[in-house]
Amino acid sequence: MSKSRLRGSLVRLTIALCVGVAATAFSAFLSLYMVERGQGARISTVHRGLYGWWNARDSVTGAHWSNLQLMDTPLGTPLYEGELAPWEEPPPPPYPQAQYLRIGTLSVGWPRPVLAMRWTVTSLTRSFPVPAELDDGDTSIAYAAESALTGNRGGGPDETTLIWSGIAIDVVLFAAVVVGPIALARRCAKGQRPSWRTPTPQAASAAAR
């Protein structure tokens, strides 16, 4: 490969990655901005070691809500039960001495989550997130998006985390959407380009037969 072709490939790759990063960030913001209602949260229980949690989960395109509420009484025997995405997992103990420890987490991004925002509440003086065992409606995910954007409802998130695995997947996907058509168009254009090479004696002889 000549230097000029290599330089051109690097330029196209750089442009594609920049577009991928911009599209990933825009996708996360759009997913957050477009949330109006959820589909209705599903409540289950999960266990991590000696601690059990009520878990309410809801999702729409590009946004996922997970609400955890610590159960009052620790278990006598450690138990690991219930599937959670890495961004949903509760922090390790010890936990604050509170009757109502609630951890609500909203992730956004499409096709994979790229940003997780978390609210941690230790009393009922804050109404958001609601206790997970009661969070079976379709509004918590919308309230979380509103809080993240404007600071209303429960205020802004207490913790924000980038999900690097999701960022890598989304950036590569959006970059491929840019690189793929360009590469295909160049290949088609190259295939249709007329050739002005002088025919070899063998080719000329074969053509005259």
Image (cartoon, rainbow, N blue to C red):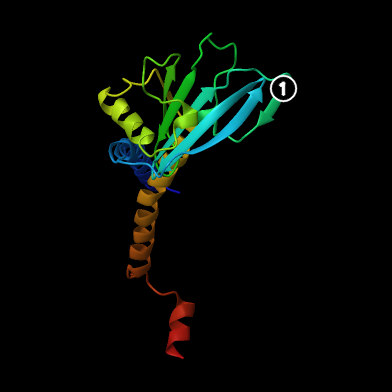
Q: Residues within 10 Å of mark 1 (few under 14, many from 20)?
A: few
Say which amino acid is labelled 1.
Pro
Residue 60 or residue 138, whichever sits in front: 138
The kind of secondary structure element at disc 1 is loop
Q: Is residue 99 above or below residue 28?
A: above
* Rendering coords of residue 113 (x, y %): 44, 37
Residue 127 occupies quadrant = top left
* Rendering coords of residue 201 (x, y %): 46, 78
Query: Is residue 65 rendered to the left or right of residue 12?
Result: right
Residue 44 occupies quadrant = top right
Q: Is residue 98 above or below residue 176?
A: above
* Rendering coords of residue 40 (x, y %): 42, 42
From the image, tell me which residue sits under label 1: 78
Residue drawn at (59%, 11%) of the image? 94
Residue 82 or residue 123, whichever sits in front: 123
Residue drawn at (31%, 37%) of the image? 22
Residue 15 occupies quadrant = top left
Residue 157 or residue 8, whichever sits in front: 157
Q: Can residue 20 be seen?
A: yes
* Rendering coords of residue 122 (x, y %): 45, 14
Q: Can residue 115 be seen?
A: no
Q: Residue furthest top?
A: 97
Query: Is residue 156 rendered to the left or right of residue 65?
Result: left
